[in-house]
Amino acid sequence: MLPFRKGIYQARLAMGQADLRQAQALRQRAFRAAASSGTGAPHPVRPVDADRFDGLCRHVLIEAVASGDLVCCYRLLPFRAGSDIGKSYAAQFYELSALGGFAGPMIEVGRFCIDPACNDPDILRIAWVALTRIVDHEGCEMLFGCSSFRGTDTAPYADAFALLAARHIAPRRWFPRVKSPAVFRFAEGLKAPDLTAAMRAMPPLLRTYLAMGGWVSDHAVIDRDLNTLHVFTGLEIRAIPPARARLLRAVAG
């Protein structure tokens, strides 16, 4: 499954507290420190981004082979079926009872981030290949999580949200409902999207989910702790276009 090496990067699972601390430090830079200089209100400086879910999750690290530098990380929380989804991180923010009827194994993907100093698109590709290996190894039938837009101002993302509303709302049988007291109901009364502007404003991770057949909630949660707007995102593995699935598996080896 992992470790996995491709080109100048390798993916592996965190082993012990030193690895976890390194991932938490990268998350701090990506979610909190970067947010302080971008859209939204500044946040107090913290040494690391950590929460109670870290001890329950497996953590995937993407490193530059030559230097050993951590360039990307994310965490995984597996569930036997949808009946356990109330224990997920996302369930704090979304009412997910509809997904309680999902019968197959699921994995929640969380805290996905790339070092703000790195802009190599291969990093995202390697992260997805590593995730593909894990999905296949564990027989996962759905990925889900929270996809984040930086900052809490909705205006810069008007076209992106309009595109989500027009094309990518969750099917009724799995529909995530409102739970958080602070939400932006973007599916209500938005204009037709400018597709170029929409894709430019869409977070890369979410863009990849959508290209593979993923869907989102009809509202964004305003998360002032992480200084983000996030949408619940789901991807049924069987919905991934066959050509894209074959490509991912071919690279995953």
Image (cartoon, rainbow, N blue to C red):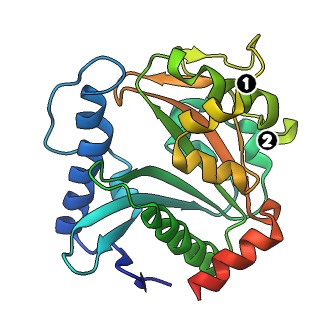
Q: Residue at x 75, y 27 (%)?
A: 165
Q: Is residue 199 left or right of residue 34?
A: right
Q: Is residue 67 left or right of residue 118?
A: left
Front residue (pair 249, 192): 192
Q: Of callouts 1 and 2, which one flags the residue occurring earlier in the amino acid sequence?
A: 2
- Can you say whether 147 is above or below 144 in the image? above
Residue 241: x and y, percent?
81, 64
Residue tagged 2: 174
In the rendered structure, find residue 193 and report the number of the disc placed on it: 1
Q: Is residue 184 left or right of residue 67?
A: right
Which is in the foreground here, disc 1 or disc 2?
A: 1
Element under disc 2: helix
**Whether residue 95 can be seen here:** no
Q: Is residue 204 left or right of residue 71?
A: right
Residue 126: x and y, percent?
48, 71
Q: Residue at x 31, y 56 (%)?
A: 118
Q: Residue at x 27, y 58 (%)?
A: 23
- All told, the count of numbered labels is 2
Element under disc 1: loop
Residue 167: x and y, percent?
80, 35
Three-letter code, disc 1 = Pro
Front residue (pair 130, 55): 130
**Whether residue 166 can be seen here:** yes
- Can you say whether 149 is above or below 70 in the image? above
In the rendered structure, find residue 152 and report the number of the disc placed on it: none
Marks 1/2: CA distance? 25 Å
Three-letter code, disc 2 = Trp
